[in-house]
Amino acid sequence: MDHIGTSFAEIGELPLDLSEAGMADVYAQVEQAYGQTPSRAGAQTRDRAQQAVLEARRQRDRHTPQ
């Protein structure tokens, strides 16, 4: 929310409370849906897997006739 919350606020008159207290329910719902923030090692493993997928797609696109 630190990154996108202000963008939502710029959309117009939305009842947004971006304070820590106002976002507490949102944070709890996100953690319930997606789990807590991964450990540093977990995030690095996730990022390596995502990079491998992106690289495989780039390789495929280079070798796919258009």
Image: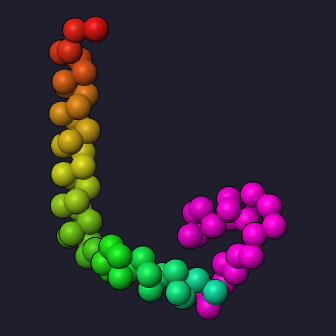
Foreground of the two, 50 or 66 = 66
Identify the image's colour scheme: rainbow, by chain, secondary structure or one colour. rainbow
Residue 39, quarter of the rendered image:
bottom left
Residue 58, quarter of the rendered image:
top left
Residue 21, quarter of the rendered image:
bottom right
Place of residue 6 in the rendered image (x, y in percent of width and height, measured from the top left): 68, 64
Place of residue 62 in the rendered image (x, y in percent of width and height, measured from the top left): 23, 17
Side of 61 where 33 appears, left or right: right
- In this rendering, does residue 45 appear at all? yes
Residue at the (58%, 69%) spot, across then down: 2
Magenta residue span: 1-21
Residue furthest to the top in view is 66
Side of 39 where 8 appears, left or right: right
Residue furthest to the bottom in view is 21
Q: Does 39 appear in magenta?
A: no
Residue at the (26%, 66%) spot, across then down: 43
Q: Does 14 appear in magenta?
A: yes
